[in-house]
Structures are given as structure tokens and as C-alpha cells.
Image (tube, rainbow, N blue to C red):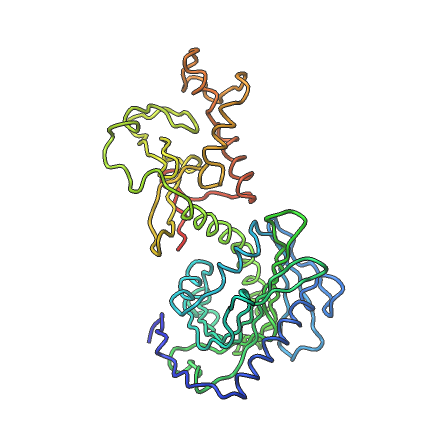
Amino acid sequence: MKLPLSAEFFPRPPLSSTQVAAIKQIARRTTVELVDHARVTGGPIQWTLSADEKYVKIFKGHDSQAPPGVTSWLAESMVCATLDEIQRMFYCANTAAYKTYIQTFYDEVKDGVKLYDIVTPTSDTPHHFIGVNWVAQVLPAHGFVVKNRDWCFVECQRDCVIDGKRAWVRSFRSIELPDACPNLYDAMGFIRAEHHRSGIVYIETDHPGVLRVLHLSQVYLHGDLMRNLNLLESVVQYGVKRRSKTMATRIERALRAHRLGATPFVLAVPPTTTDGPIGDSTTCTLCCKRFGLLGRRVQCQKCGHVVCRRAKCSALWDVPLQGHVFSRRICTLCSTGGGADALARHERRDASYVIADDDQCSTSTSHETEQSRCFDDAELDKVLMTYSGLDLKLSGQDDDLRFCVT
């Protein structure tokens, strides 16, 4: 038996009214406890700073009220998004959407199924959800060092106010439903792990469009791993740190892809010939590097400007359009939200602007406008940071960098 599993794999018999009431109670209690226990200071857990890195702070804690073997970790970070955007992004109406969400935001979580929807959003409570989910987690080395885990848990999403600021909470608490979600150790080798009290709190800050993120992880992993406490702590800390560091970047990229899909494109399809403006252009609109024999020119499908394929100037984005995902070549200014407005502001700059590579652009009076709009690498890096809100680090080849968001 292999992943992914279909939604029909799980029996999912109807829940009794008693079970439904119990799940609602678990969801509400866990959400209240999550907000309380995720406080860096002033909460029931005394947190000790374990790692202070560029994008995230990791705290280790001890919860004297938790069962033996439960590890407690807290990650604090920031993300450039609004609560409305986060809420829309993380609500999944069905198993297909849930699998896409997992694929987009997680590396180690390989599959998931929505087992039950207990409370779904309404016009009065559009951000309120309670459900039961199952996910499969494939750990490094594919389970040869540490066995793979799976989780069956109650998830609750709801709005709240924390210290006078709007917030949105996602809480997780494991639940046993053997008739609906049987243990898969014999069938697939997964050890059933437990969320004692886990989740994420998104809180508005004094800076519009910036959220403070608190990710609490109180888990019991079960299995032989519990016999080696040092390895246990290392595994959990590694997971919390990696997930927190990558989540902010993936959220930001996913938001940018969705924003790109929500606004018009000048070009509906990639150009197939070099006729017209793309064929007449001799330099990249952004960096002004000349197109040589090896420097293929491409056209931003958002604004229509001709750019080079360097990662600092353009990239391929998988953009959601009309319920499908399409690959689109988009320049740096458009992908970071600056677009034509940023280019216009740049063109109005003082004529004394100096280009890094003067020999790559004409210096004649008739080309002063072209010269004044060129960006050097330092400026393109600054554009990426200014418009995205994150110190985005580009990796891979300069040619044809690809951001995959589905």
C-alpha cells in the first residue's frame, strides 16, 4: 500500500451526537489552551530561547501539566500577509483541496484526508471551522532512521482577539476514532503520533500587512524514539525549526502567486515568435544587459516588458487561473507587487543615476530615458526585499528559476 490514499480508504461511519459534541468540546478547549500556552512570556509554560535565527526564534519549554514524554517547542516568526489572506489560504473545503494545501506548504507531510467536517464556515462565522483530519508524515531517510508517523486529530480554526489585537487560530488535538481512522502500522508501518496541544496563532501587528506567528508544538511521538530523549528532542526541534523557517517564505510566495492570478495579464500565452516588440528589443528592461547569442530574451506576461532570463529579472511562476494552474513568465517588478508603478517611479529618477555596467547601455541623449530605468543587481535585490517584505534568497540556476505554487 502506497501514498497517497484516497478519501474512500477510510471507513468514516457517521458520528453519534455524543461524538460530535465531544469533538466540539475538544476543539474549543484546545483553542483556548493554545492561545494561553503559546505566550512567550506570562503564560503557563516558561520558555527558554534555544535558537535565534534570521527568520525565526525557537523556544524550548517544559509543561509540568502535560503527560510524560510530551515535548514542548514554540517558534516565533513574522509573515507578510493579512488575516483574511491567511484564513482563505488555510481553509480546505474538501480532501482534494487539503492534499493541494499539504503539497504546497509541507515537505515531510506527504498525504492527508479530511475525515469529518463538524462545523463549516457560514456568513455569520466565515472563519470558523471544526473538523477531523488524517495526515501522513514521512521523516528523513524515509523512515530508516526514525520511523514514519501519521496523525489523526481535531482541527479548529477561529477568530479571536489577543491583547487587543485581531488574531486567527488553528489548533490541533489528537483523537482516537478506530472505526473511522484505524491504526496503519501493520498496513503501512506508520506509528500513530499524538498532538497533545499544537497549533498556530496569527496576530496582527502595528504594521499593516505583517502578522506575528506563534507556532506551538506539544507532541508525543510514540515508538522506540521515546527511549532516546536526546534524539527525540533533536527530531522535534529540527521539525519545528525547518517548518517555521520555510512556512513564511511559502506563504509569501503563495500569496504572490494568487495575487498575480487575480489581476490581468497583458499576454495570455507565451510568445511563439520574435516578431514585434520582443524581437526589436536589444536590452533587458530591468538590468539593461544586452541580449547576445546566449542571452535569450523573454517577455513578462503580466506587463509585457522584455526582460532577460536571469533570476533577478524574471522567473517562471505557477499561477492559479480560473481553477487551473498555468506557468507564466513574470518579471521581478510584477512578481513583487511593484509592476509598472515601480518602473515609472524608477524612470523619473534624477538623470545623475549611474549604471553599474555603463558599456551595456547607450549613453547618448536620445537614450537617457532607457539608461535611467536600468536596475543594477543591488537595486534588484532591494526591490525584492522592499516589495515582498522578506529578504528573499534566490537559489538554483540564474537561468529559469522557477517558483512552484499550486
Camera-side residue: 202 or 189? Answer: 202
For this orientation, the residue located farthest to the top is: 365
For this orientation, the residue located farthest to the front is: 123
Residue 110 % position (x, y): 41, 66
Dividing the image into 4 quarters, which one contains the N terminus?
Answer: bottom left
Residue 366 % position (x, y): 41, 12
Q: Against 7, is 333 above or below? A: above
Q: Against 382, is 54 above or below? A: below
Query: Which residue is at a point 47% across and 75% down the rendered structure image?
Result: 117
Residue 98 % position (x, y): 43, 66
In the picture, measured across the screen, residue 43 lies left or right of residue 153, that is right
In the picture, measured across the screen, residue 214 lies left or right of residue 346, that is right
Camera-side residue: 255 or 134? Answer: 255
Query: Which residue is at a point 39% across and 25% down the rendered structure image?
Result: 289
Dividing the image into 4 quarters, which one contains the C terminus?
Answer: bottom left
For this orientation, the residue located farthest to the right is: 42
